[in-house]
Image (spheres, rainbow, N blue to C red):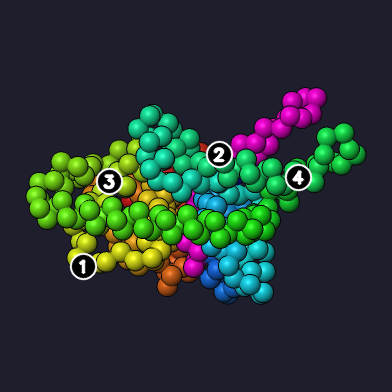
Amino acid sequence: MIRVTSTINGPPLTFNASVSGLAVYLDNFSLIDLAKGEPLRRKRFTDALRKSADLLFSVTNAAELAGPQGRSLDAVRALLDEIGPRWFPVELNTVEVVSRETSGASASESCVSQKFMKDYFTDRLSNFSPGTASVINLSKDFFRLGPVLDWVGRQRDSIRKGMADLDSALINRITAYRAEFERSPSWLDQHFPALPFNPLMPATFTYVNLVRTIIVNARAYQLKDGDGADFCHAVMAGAFASLATLDKHWKRRIESLPKPNRLARIYYGPELDTMVTDIESWLNKAGTLAPEQHSNPRH
């Protein structure tokens, strides 16, 4: 959730992002499906978020969602607006996130995108100049996600180029790793040993074991355009969400990682109805418990 605080005398404002209750991570296909699909399901989903859940959302999500035009874009924008302040700006640079974890950062410090949050508020406050009579209305409407599609949309080409570069980097890296593994199978355990789950470093666990899985199965599945971003989505969704949607291939990869772990429960497109029902069930159950008894639906 996005919150703002101020001194007793007014500005300067301090903006904070936190997750309370469930953390939900959606791939863009699911967001579009929720926006354009069955109206009752969409309402159930947004009602659940407003009750006690937060959407983990990245700049890359926004850039990719800015692609649809006309009614599709309008539907996505409306859904994001309905979420209100119940979202969290998530970092998608997995190398940076792993580095933060290794340095001892907390989960929220590791996964937050400070730049996204700063850019968001810079844009939202751009129409308010010091010394004018303009009043900043910090109601829930101020924190809408819909406007993100506009200012990120203007940067869509550069963001997509960055994602294309990420694809190339991942494909080249995995190809090189695979060659090392084929020359010497012991190389894998030396450089990407199977890690046990550490609740203090969930992204590191997911990143290392996912790279290991891709190397071992490189012949069975050739990486393609888009997999660089999908790899990052999978790491962040698996590590920091309670529930998440990914495509079927990445869902299977996350579910194949060493157990026991506390990664997100993953759904794919046809399971979207089930996910919404599961969110409601957990929130209903959590509502009957004392706060310290609340359980998390991670594995």
Residue 188 x/y as whole percent: 16, 47
Q: Which residue corresponds to mark 1? A: 220
Queried whether the magenta region covers residue 35, the answer comes back as: no
Q: Residue furthest top?
A: 8
Residue appearing at x 34%, y 66% in the figure: 224
Give the mark, 3 or 2, whose residue is nearer the N terminus: 2
Q: Amino acid at mark 3?
A: Val
Give the mark, 2 or 4, whose residue is nearer the N terminus: 2
Q: CA distance from mark 3 to mark 2?
A: 24 Å
Residue 67, by quadrant, is bottom right
87 vs 126, nearest the viewer: 126
Q: Amino acid at mark 4?
A: Ser
Work out whether residue 256 can be spotted.
no
Whether residues under marks 2 and 4 lie with C-beta atoms below 8 angstroms apart, the answer is no
Q: Amino acid at mark 1?
A: Ala
Residue 50 x/y as whole percent: 62, 53
Q: Which residue corresponds to mark 2? A: 114
Q: Which residue corresponds to mark 3? A: 208
Residue appearing at x 45%, y 57% in the figure: 163
Q: Secondary structure at mark 1?
A: loop
Q: Quadrant of the image for the N terminus?
A: top right
Q: Secondary structure at mark 2?
A: helix
Residue appearing at x 60%, y 56% in the figure: 155
Residue 68 x/y as whole percent: 59, 70
Residue appearing at x 38%, y 29% in the figure: 103
Query: For residue 126, which numbered disc appears in the image?
Result: 4
